[in-house]
Image (tube, rainbow, N blue to C red):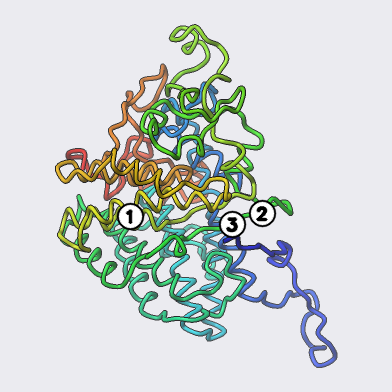
Amino acid sequence: MKKTIYILLFALVFSACDKGFDEININPTKPSQIDVRNKMTAVELFTSGRRYESWRANLIYSSTMMQHFATTAGYWAGDKYTWNRGYAASLIDAYTTSAVKNVEDMMLQLETEEAPKEMKAVTRILRVFIYHRLTDMYGDIPYSEAGKGVIEGILTPKYDAQSAIYADMLKELEQSAADLSTGDSGFGSADIMFQGDQGKWKRFANSMMLRLALRMIKVDPAGAKEWATKAINGGVMTSNDDIAYIQHTAGPEGINKNGNGEVFTVDGSPRMSDTFIGFLQDDPRLPILAWRRGDHSTDPADLKGLPNGLDLTMLKELTGEENTDAYAEPNRSIITGEDAPMFFQTYAEAEFMLAEAGVRWGLAGDPEEHYNNGVRAAMKMLELYTPDAAISDAAIDTYLAAHPYDSANAIEQINTQYWIATFLNEYETFANWRRVGYPRLTPINYPGNVTNGTIPRRLTYPSSEESNNAENLAAAIAAQGPDELTTRVWWDTPGGSE
């Protein structure tokens, strides 16, 4: 079901000040406080992402590192493990002045206005999502002092250790979920993700808790199991109706549009990676996700993937071709629109995580059932793009018969399906791959790469921090390691593919 977005961006800056004679002593040049419901709409859209960071962090870097996309364009640095510092910093740059700043302002306003606990809980859950996306991409980040420039005058926030951030985020999710029940949270239609539905926010909080718990399997196995148990007992997503997503619109201008879609409108470079096409060969999702660039054929026999890590010269040396139009690109009739949905977390992901929790700890029941549910949900959710993307139950049954659950290879199989299901939510694809190492991707060794031919492990901080927040940046680098693409975040420790 599509959710219609209504937002006046100027409402974040201006609001009516002339209320009548009873307010004649109010300074007419000072705007009154904007309704927190309007701010919720804006923060959800900021979190979904604008073209700037969607282009650079989500697509140019993450999607090609994870071999969903490939391109011969030199400025697509992630495809070649080269370093464009501005691109690598784009997510934290964009979020700091939009999602972070505004969600912290919302938190203060809700406290000041003594808002109902349900509204506070929903805002806290959204706040966790914002910071968890940031810390998973960069590691140690400003957290406890972030977004406090106007509120508390903190212009040089300290960087918190990711381990401490995770502990607080899990606590926030647990407490917030406990404060929710059923009915409208108070945000109503201003909540363009769940229309104020407390039950869906509660299940989103627990599903996110499960995601964070599984991130910790290498660094805190006991804690990972404890928090996974809490999440499962609290109740995670139960159907595609629970998916956390923003249904964008093609206008008006600005953040109402899908950030990825805006990129696809102006950038014809990305092709489907041959790695991804290879995994999708007998998958009914293939003709929905891809078509041939030149003639728009969706016949699987026509959908050839582009190898990663090539420029045009290398492509010609390898294949004799200089034109990439014969290679598959994202299907522009279905998934690349500026009005496409943007997914934060899906029911399919929740089912795959339940399957993994069953394999690792004997939690949540039968892993095979959850695996099958995850595959089915991942295929059915494509209908959220358009009814034309519907996949029949018979086609799904055929696929599952050809790819039955394999208990001997379960972790790899589950997380390979997770990799497919998170296509276009490349932030999550990148994070989950670093956690488990599946699917097994073959690194490239493009000339001049900065990782010695290894797949990057994080993105890097903004150069502006060197002048604006140098002392705290230096402390973060001293604690975490060099500000490089190869430095691992706290939960991404070496030691096997899992």
Residue at image position (56%, 36%) is 331
The disc at residue 373 is 1
Closer to the camera: disc 3 or disc 1?
A: 1
According to the picture, the residue beneath numbered tag 3 turns out to be 247
Who is closer to the viewer here, 492 or 465?
A: 492
Three-letter amino acid code at the position of disc 2: Thr
In x, y percent, where is residue 247? 59, 57
In x, y percent, where is residue 155? 52, 60
Depicted 271 relative to depicted 139: above or below: above
Three-letter amino acid code at the position of disc 3: Gln
The disc at residue 142 is none
According to the picture, the residue beneath numbered tag 2 turns out to be 249
Residue at image position (39%, 44%) is 429
| Residue ranking furthest to the front | 394
Side of 262 where 132 appears, left or right: left
In x, y percent, where is residue 241? 47, 64
Closer to the camera: disc 1 or disc 2?
A: 1
Q: Evaluate if marks 1 and 2 touch, with contact meaning CB atoms under 8 Å apart.
A: no
Real-space Cα separation, disc 3 to disc 2, in angstroms? 7 Å
Real-space Cα separation, disc 3 to disc 1, in angstroms? 24 Å
